[in-house]
Amino acid sequence: MQDKIILENLEVECIIGIFDWERKVKQKLEISLELDCDLSKASKSDSIVDTVDYKTISKSIVDLVKSSKYFLIETIAEKVSELCIANDGVFNAKVTVSKPGAIRGSKNISVQISRPNDLHTVFLGVGSNIEPEKNIQHCLNLLRSRFLVKQVSPVYKSEAWGVGEKQEDYLNLAVMVKTEKDIFAVRGETNWIEKIVGRKRSENKFASRPIDIDLLLFDSIVDEKDGGTLPHFQLLTQQFVYLPMLDIAPDLIVPGFEKALNKITPNFDNPELVVNKLRLILE
């Protein structure tokens, strides 16, 4: 990859250092970046939507660093690199963090690290029909504690589908996360979150539930074993899965179909099912 975005000497003041006085007085750090990315599309279209949003990245770095109270600039460099490579358009990030005047007799001391963007892209379907607003918010909080949450779709409301008895309506949404965890670890994490939120599995797989988390997509994996089907079989058969995904990933190339999601005609099991997008704000 030959294209780079280079940001030099971004100045941020923060608490940094191991000595007592350094835990009380903010010091200036200088942060420089080299981000490997593909700028060919942006260079031809001349459109900001086709490039890496380096203004947003720099603002996020400032917000991260100025509120931190780390002891080492090595840690600052690692956290900044994680932030950079979480951007879908960044393939590698070289981060230099400098602490001017930290060493007597030297103008500057710096650390430099390089990190590849080898995070997995995962899409999850989240649903609930028992205290759904409360439990979905709890679920999102837990997902953020275990993964890097990139996007959260609007919430959709629909009647319970495929059940034999009357149930409360469901709320559903889709979530995109980034993670270094493999597919088995992701399934373990989502099962753990379901238990924490209060789900108790029974023989009735259609029972009402405080939370349900489905693994919809994991990178470009196409699989019909190892714990479930990928892509999830409901992605193109249920409105409450398809519509939230369409909101956050319309141009996603669906594994096994090799077409963008918005170019695939879904085949809904119940075309008459009414699904409404809500103006529900989740944090």
Image (spheres, helix red, strand yellow):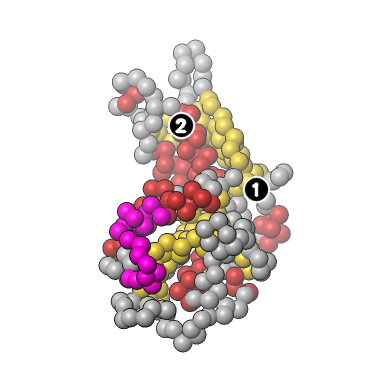
* Inter-mark Cα distance, 2 to 1: 24 Å
Start-end of magenta stretch: 191-208
Q: Residues within 10 Å of mark 2 (few under 14, many from 20)?
A: few
Residue 139 percent location from the top left of the image: 35, 57
Figure quadrant of the C terminus: bottom left
Outermost residue toward the bottom in this view = 272
204 in magenta: yes
Q: Is residue 230 above or below residue 96?
A: below
Figure quadrant of the N terminus: top right
Residue 51 percent location from the top left of the image: 61, 55
Element type where label 2 sits in the image: helix
Judging by the rendered image, the residue that carries numbered circle 1 is: 37
Taking the spot 60% from the left edge, 52% from the top edge, the residue there is 89
Residue 161 percent location from the top left of the image: 41, 78
Judging by the rendered image, the residue that carries numbered circle 2 is: 75
Q: Is residue 166 above or below residue 210?
A: below
What predominant SS class does the magenta segment belong to? Answer: loop
Q: Is residue 182 above or below residue 171?
A: above
Q: Check disc 1 and give the amino acid type.
A: Cys
Q: Is residue 14 left or right of residue 187?
A: left
Taking the spot 33% from the left edge, 61% from the top edge, the residue there is 199
Element type where label 1 sits in the image: strand
Q: Which residue is at the front of the view, 55 or 149?
A: 149
Query: Given contact means CB atoms under 8 Å apart, are the residues at marks 2 and 1 in contact?
Result: no
